[in-house]
Image (spheres, rainbow, N blue to C red):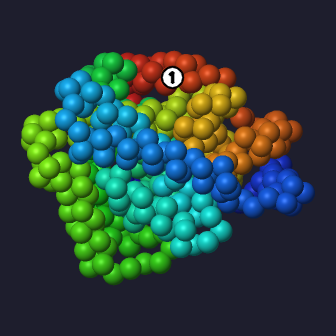
Amino acid sequence: MDTTSPIFSKTDNLKFFRTLNKRVNDYFKENNLNKTGNWKLHVKTVVMFTIFLTPYFFLLAMDMPFWVYLLLNVVIGIGMAGVGMNVMHDGNHGAYSSKSWVNKFMGGSIYILAGNVYNWQVQHNVLHHTYTNILGHDEDLEAGRIMRFTKEAKWYRFHKFQHFYSVFLYGLLTFNWSITTDFLQMKRYLKRNLSYGEFKKPSIRWTTLVITKVIYFSIWLVLPMVLGITWWKVLLGFLVMHYTAGVILSVVFQLAHVVEETDNPIPDDNGEIENTWAIHQLFTTANFAPKNWLVNYYTGGLNHQIEHHIFPNISHVHYGKIGEIVKQTAQECNLPYFEFKSTRAALQSHFKHLKELGQKPQFT
């Protein structure tokens, strides 16, 4: 990762963000709405946690056929991703509630999803949201040698097959969180003195990480074994749960940023990005299936990534409405507004893009 931060242009002759921000603020004032979550989000929280935890308690309490056991772990994975996208995500953006303690509590749900609040906030809120799609700064584009997400990344012969093997690797996302990623990220972020909000002592960060990991593995691995579930079934179920959640979360991200339409801007020799930060988000982000009720509901509005990137502190329950304002303002300014009408169209664009990146040597 490059530690020299790019600088965004401060010149907005189109007055895009000023106009958009005023229109969005007026929408909330005129409709007497808070920008944070409402009763719809509260109900959804109960729904997602029910999907996530109910199968777990069934697994602990009942003896069942092996295929039912595996199926319930798939459901847990679906619920795990649902909690992450709908509850944890809004909480760690400070968008779940107007009360900070509620946001911290809901954001803390990441600890039972195998993650860590500090790491997630730095990686997502600071690096990804600030330097979206900029190679060397947005860690969501980093996958080691095995995947190539931009034409600037080094090309290897095996990338020719990445559109085939990618989905198998996507499923390892949250499993890697639980085992290695959090430890590597914390070491890297603390060395760079990165933080989101209050900067706590490294000793506190490491202690929190170790304690929460012990609790996490006690819940998902130790307790089921203590209650009599065979060790290999527990481990297999754990893998199935994580693989399900990992595929869902990875694909949702990829459809928003790694598609044919989106850009990967490169800083100039002075380290400057051509556009302002808000306009940069339009060039690097895409929406998908904006009219699909189920996709909207389950992904926590992450199919409205454009709105989320420009207004990360607004709860996803409002994205459908403010999306109309963002789209209109972008069109008036002759700026891009990338939008796939369906999830299928976005998937096709993503895997086609992977195929193209895999067949072409790096940009020079």
Residue highlighted by disc 1? 347
Closer-to-camera residue (269/166): 166
Closer-to-camera residue (136/245): 245
Label tally: 1
Residue 152 x %, y %: 43, 36
Residue 110 x %, y %: 40, 57
- Residue at horizontal 41 percent and vertical 19 percent from the top: 355
Would residue 109 appear left or right of 293 to someone viewing this image? Answer: left
Would residue 8 appear left or right of 233 to someone viewing this image? Answer: right
- Residue at horizontal 30 percent and vertical 78 percent from the top: 204
Would residue 172 appear left or right of 40 to someone viewing this image? Answer: left
Amino acid type at circle 1 is Leu
Would residue 116 appear left or right of 340 to someone viewing this image? Answer: left
Q: Quadrant of the N terminus?
A: bottom left
Closer-to-camera residue (274/171): 171
Q: Quadrant of the C terminus?
A: top left
